[in-house]
Image (cartoon, grey):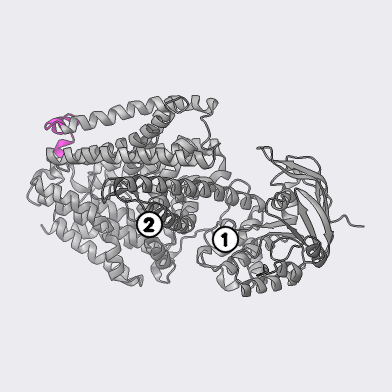
Amino acid sequence: MLPPLVLVQGLSYQYEDGTIALRSLDFSLQKGESVALLGANGSGKTTFALHLNGLLSAGKGTVEICGLPVNPKNLTEIRRKIGLVFQDSESQLFMPTVLEDVAFGPLNHGLSPQEAADRAQHALHLVGMSTMKGKAPYHLSAGEKKRVAIAGILAMDPEILVLDEPTTFLDPPGQRALAQLLLELPQAKILITHDMPFARAVCTRAAFFQQGQIVEEGSVEQVARRHDWDFTAPRTA
Amino acid sequence: MHIPDGFLSTPVWAALDVVGIPTAGYIVRVAQREFEDSKVPLLGVMGAFVFAAQMINFPVGVGTSGHLVGGALLACTLGPAAASVVMTAILAIQALVFQDGGILALGANVFNMAIVGVFAGYLPYYLWGRGRARRASIFAAGALSVAVSALLAMAELLLSGVHMPASILGVSLGLFAVSALIEGAITMAVIGALEAIQPNFPRPLAAARARNYAVGALALAALVLAAGGVVAASTAPDGIERLALDTGIAQHARTWIASPLKDYQAGFLGAGWPAQAGAGVLGIAMAGGLCVLIGRKR
Amino acid sequence: MHHVTLDQWSRGVSGLHQRDPRVKIAAVLVFLVVLATAHRMLPWLCLALFAVLCTVTLAARIPLAGALTRAGVVLPFSAVFAAVSWLAGDPQRGAALLMKSYLSAFAVLLLVSTTPLPLLLRGFEMTGAPRFLLMVAQFLYRYLFVISEEAQHMRKAAWSRGATAAGLAGNAQRFRAAAGALAVLFARSYARAGDIHRAMLSRSFPGYFRPLVELHLHREDVAFLFGGVLTPIVLRVLIEGAS
């Protein structure tokens, strides 16, 4: 049997200033799954995500991606398999044009400029942004930026997508379009989000973070109900 | 003060291209070693910050306002080599995209603001930035960086033969002093505010690193003196003439004037404008060549 | 904003836009050197070079009036020194400063408005400028748009905080508010740089940038190089010969 795509065991992490961000956390992700990570700001979701591709790696415990332990030796391989889409697309789209940005990852993996450009074109096609390839990222709308950022990850042909707050800055039609796109993509997904309708639409499972631990896992509906994690209008007297 | 093209005489801009651009190239290599390539975004974004910071006006006196120049702020927070690289990138973008400062004069502007200005500004902070006089040293850093850059630019203009009556020189020096004080005050206030919101920032001087800078700082003290000397010479009525005569520039300086009547203008380098232009091109080629030499090993 | 307009112009379509950045850089450098070293018959030479630049602007389908105005950003600075020269009894030098600085700025403006900046920086890289510096410049330019916007928000915030008190006390308050705004902008920019760096590492940044597009010189580029280099030189020889 294949190993799980993501296997995290006993992961702990403490920031330099002494804040404990993760405490002995266990998590696993199987092929085809889409998991929503829910929980309050500062509960450790983003810190957790940064461990998945080795951007953070100081604490105790192990992280394995497709059976490979995350360590300096495996980083290139790991980062090919798991792609992170950050919350602020503006910081992720740092190259001068859309095409150059999407080709950035493939070029770093040693593809020739021609191959990298082909990969980038294909990825842009997948997210429906082929016509934008010559544009400067600055001139795109928030939704378009998010799509291009996702294309930049898809161009590396990963098996797992991690998206941090993907719906921030998006208007409702943009959110709907993004949900549609994610449902069409075959990769396993981890979504950090506060957006419950979005999580319900896209995710098959949810994990609830509290003070650096996963305290509950189950269906999105179940987890949200147990932790009263949904927006309801405050009562007016 | 960004010098546009057309202000400096050929020997001045060519010489400063030959000196300034390869020096900047060398500093880039130092910064690269110190910061590793992966810090490209840090230096780039901080450059954008300095640019954008100029949109925020600081009220000084009634109805007037100043803004941050930034060299000293960067030197005190990122270190002088990184600050110098950022300022060089800023000057290049300003010259290209904003037509603020010339292309041939880029060497001069880089020399004044990104090299001497930054390192001279770093000197007080380097000397006293750790002790009780920290705030004063930051003030002095800002003031000195602007004063030195402005004085150098002025000296270069004088050397190029731009005439300035004594009264106007006096007013300019007064303005320089005011801008220097404003930059000092802004730099000090911003670093103060920064330390209030992020107590462990800017980082204290790392002792090991600081030692490497001692040599550079001393060299720069000499440069500051030199700059002061040039200006002192030029403020005395005969100073610039005497200096120019001594260095053989006077003949050129006088002939630079746009006058078809003066026949002796071809005297520079003895062979008319193709030679002069040739000297300019040679200067650019030398600057480029030195950069290639310095930058060859990555 | 100035740079946004130039950015749009630089993405236009014309024969000039398509030329290799290196030949355009060479042509502009020669233009600048010819102009900077000129002194005889300067007004006539400037007139001729001005006509050349105007022709190029039209050929590149860049709005002429807009380009002429934008090149004028150097004029206030030049005018001060021109006035000083005039007061010092040297009006010819004053006029020379104005003409030379304006034409130089115009030439550089044309270079930038027919070449997207990243491509221009690539061109400079191939002439020997350090790549690290050019990458810093490229990131600077990329995030200039983003951080300028943040700065505008900060400016509003600073104003609204310091706008209550009048007179000198108000000034001191506004000064502190502006310093606070800049400190926040600094911290945010620093944090953003960290985010960008993480995003780069996530896509396996190896420590140097690999270019996607290689620059190649075509026959038209070589032709342009000859034309661009010879035009100012020939004009100057002809005009100075006529005196």
Give the number of callouts. Answer: 2
Query: Among all residues in the image, which is located at the extreme right?
Result: A1
Could you tell me if residue C131 is visible in this image? no
Element marked by disc 1: helix
Q: Looking at the image, is C228 positioned above or below residue B6?
A: below
Where residue B238 sits: x, y (%)?
11, 31
Residue A97 x %, y %: 53, 62
The disc placed on residue A100 is: 1
Which chain letter goes with mark 2?
B
Q: Kindly identify the amino acid type of the residue bearing the numbered disc 1.
A: Glu
| Image mark 1: chain | A
Residue B73 in picture, x, y percent from top left: 43, 39
- Name the image quarter holding residue C22: bottom left
The magenta span reads B236-252
Provide the major secondary structure of the magenta segment.
helix
Q: What is the quadrant of the N terminus of chain B in the image? A: top left
Give the residue at the far front of this rendering: A237
Q: Which mark is residue B29?
A: none
Q: Which residue is mark 2?
A: B97
For label 2, the SS is: helix
User: Can you say whether B230 is above or below B51 in the image?
Assistant: above
